[in-house]
Image (spheres, rainbow, N blue to C red):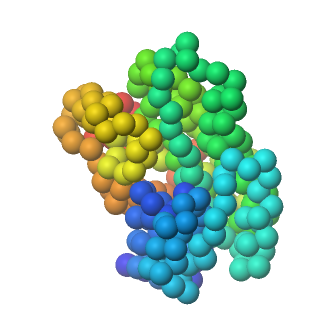
Amino acid sequence: MARFDGKRVLITGGTSGMGLAGARRIVSEGGEVILTGLHEERLQAAREEFGDRAIVVKIDSSAPVATALDDIVRSTGNLNGLWLNAAFATLGALEDIGASQFDKIMAANVRGPMLQLAVLSPNLAPGASVVLTSSSSAYEGAAVTSLYAATKGAIIAMARSWATAMAPRGIRVNVLVPGPIETNFRSFLPDEARRGFEDFVINNVPMRRAGTAEEAAAVALFLLSDDSSYVTGSQYAVDGGLIGY
């Protein structure tokens, strides 16, 4: 298939995990990508892998403005797809949450995509698709994920409003809701703590396994492509049945 032939898609957090898996599929299906990330090694690896089929830039999604992204898109042409995927997670008891921790994760996971879409909206071509990455954490009610879950719940609420706002332009907005996916997303945890948390989550997954980055990206690409031309304001869970939504 060549669903993305002649199309340009921007993926924030696109140099690892689900974003990178999605970029590979888009390029293999005829498209071009703009990828953002923070880690130099991953940025360079993506540049070497994709060559002239990708623009790979170092951008911090928690920055208070998104003008750098706007400049890049203006210089390359309008976007047919936008996957706002960059985020990070934190775990901890409610009593341990402080103002600086709150501000840091809200800046990256909520303010970032809000301002990015605000500034990039004029650069979205008619019929473009926007996908936002939320998380099953928004529904799980796990005691140690309240702060992270709050950011991902905000993503769902924002997307519903954006779907209404952008529908007159023929632009669709949908949410990917991954469950436990095999990526480096929880690499901030010590090995033992990470394995314990993942085992706890996976024991509640009916399919009894974690998903792969490729499985999650496949659903994101469905939403980014014309295959989902009558889908907007929706949530698609990729979680092995964890939340049953």
Q: Residue furthest bottom?
A: 52
User: Percent position (x, y) of residue 241?
Assistant: 29, 36
Vertically, is 89 above or below 173? above
Q: Residue at x 74, y 50 (%)?
A: 63
Between residue 61 and residue 18, name the one nearer to us: 61
Between residue 38 and residue 115, name the one nearer to us: 38
Vertically, is 60 above or below 134? below
User: Percent position (x, y) of residue 11?
Assistant: 57, 62
Between residue 135 and residue 232, name the one nearer to us: 135
Q: Residue at x 73, y 64 (%)?
A: 69
Q: Residue furthest left?
A: 208
User: Percent position (x, y) of residue 107?
Assistant: 69, 40
Q: Is residue 146 visible?
A: yes
Q: Residue at x 41, y 25 (%)?
A: 140
Q: Residue at x 50, y 38 (%)?
A: 89
Q: Is residue 128 visible?
A: no
Residue 219, by quadrant, is bottom left
30 sits left or right of 244 in the view: right
104 sits left or right of 120 in the view: left
Which quadrant of the rendered structure holds the C terminus?
top left
12 sits left or right of 92 in the view: right
Vertically, is 185 above or below 20? above
Between residue 188 and residue 173, name the one nearer to us: 188
User: Percent position (x, y) of residue 196?
Assistant: 27, 30
Which quadrant of the rendered structure holds the N terminus?
bottom left
Q: Residue furthest top?
A: 95
Residue 102, by quadrant, is top right
